[in-house]
């Protein structure tokens, strides 16, 4: 498979060079290491929403290190949102994510990749893709939600399910149930429990595919932007 630099060189590369220029890329940018940014995204998904600002920081890091970023998107299914019959689509979405990355990387081969993997389906899909495309790669998980502290208790998203049982048993009122529903998911990020979103991020980290601390630093912690920027810089160093 020819690399992108080879495809945009010489007379034969005039057409793609012209296309990249009309997208705003300079000659200098096209001569640098070209880093793809596979970003799992769905606007209603709190984990992938957390990646919006982090992606900007990754881009900044790539530019700082002398590379050129090319961001593209994949689907991002959230099990907590899917529920019921929607879950029939959740597990197969891993294969779709892997295929999406493999297709665009085959069509537009990069020198390296940054994977911004939102949750427990996009993360394994992107791990599969990383193995298939065999390019220098690094991962950016979004980080977990922060819990909410109220009424002397730490509230996390699993408290909603507990409250569903309490309501069914008549032990709490509908007003109390509504209040618990509204406070249990406090911020953007992966589920505020040690669920599959966080465990997949931990797996990425122990495999050496993220920078240290990336799995568990909360999504809304300002240090995540520094970490994302450093990840972009590391992506260039890997190539």
Image (cartoon, grey):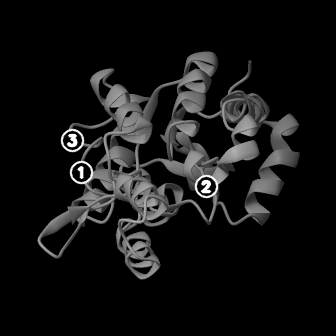
Q: What residue did someone put label 3 on?
A: 213
Q: Nearer the viewer, residue 209 or 122?
A: 122
Q: Is residue 27 left or right of residue 165?
A: right
- Mark 2, Cα crowd under 10 Å, few <14 / some 14-19 / many 20+, is few
Q: Residue furthest left?
A: 152
- Residue drawn at the location 38% of the way across and 78% of the way down: 179
Identify the secondary structure beneath mark 2: helix
Q: What residue did someone put label 1 on?
A: 217
**Closer to the camera: disc 3 or disc 2?**
2
Q: What residue did someone put label 2 on?
A: 81
**Closer to the camera: disc 1 or disc 2?**
2
Examine the rendered structure and indicate whether residue 236 appears above or below residue 125: below
Q: Residue furthest front?
A: 170
Q: Do the residues under discs 1 and 2 have CB atoms within 8 angstroms? A: no
Residue at mark 1 to residue at mark 2: CA–CA distance:
23 Å
Identify the secondary structure beneath mark 3: loop
Where does residue 237 sit, x and y in percent of width and height? 35, 35
Q: Is residue 171 left or right of residue 76?
A: left
């Amino acid at each position: 498979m020819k690399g992108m630099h080879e495809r945009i060189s010489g007379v034969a590369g005039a057409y793609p060079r012209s296309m990249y220029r009309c997208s705003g890329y300079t000659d200098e940018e096209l001569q640098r290491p070209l880093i793809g940014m596979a970003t799992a995204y769905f606007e209603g998904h709190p984990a992938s929403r957390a990646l919006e600002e982090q992606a900007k920081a990754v881009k900044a890091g790539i530019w700082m290190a002398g590379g050129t970023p090319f961001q593209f998107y994949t689907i991002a299914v959230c099990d907590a949102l899917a529920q019921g019959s929607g879950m029939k689509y959740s597990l197969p979405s891993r294969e779709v994510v892997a295929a999406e990355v493999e297709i665009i990387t085959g069509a537009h081969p990069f020198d390296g990749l940054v994977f911004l993997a939102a949750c427990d389906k996009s993360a394994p899909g992107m791990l599969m893709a990383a193995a298939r495309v065999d390019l220098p790669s690094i991962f950016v998980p979004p980080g977990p939600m922060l819990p909410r502290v109220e009424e002397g208790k730490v509230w996390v998203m699993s408290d909603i399910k507990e409250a569903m049982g309490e309501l069914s048993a008549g032990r709490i009122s509908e007003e109390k149930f509504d209040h618990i529903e509204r406070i249990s998911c406090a911020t953007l990020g992966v589920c505020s429990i040690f669920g599959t979103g966080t465990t997949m991020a931990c797996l990425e980290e122990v495999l050496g595919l993220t920078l240290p601390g990336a799995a568990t630093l909360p999504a809304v912690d300002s240090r995540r932007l520094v970490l994302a920027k450093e990840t972009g810089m590391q992506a260039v160093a890997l190539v």
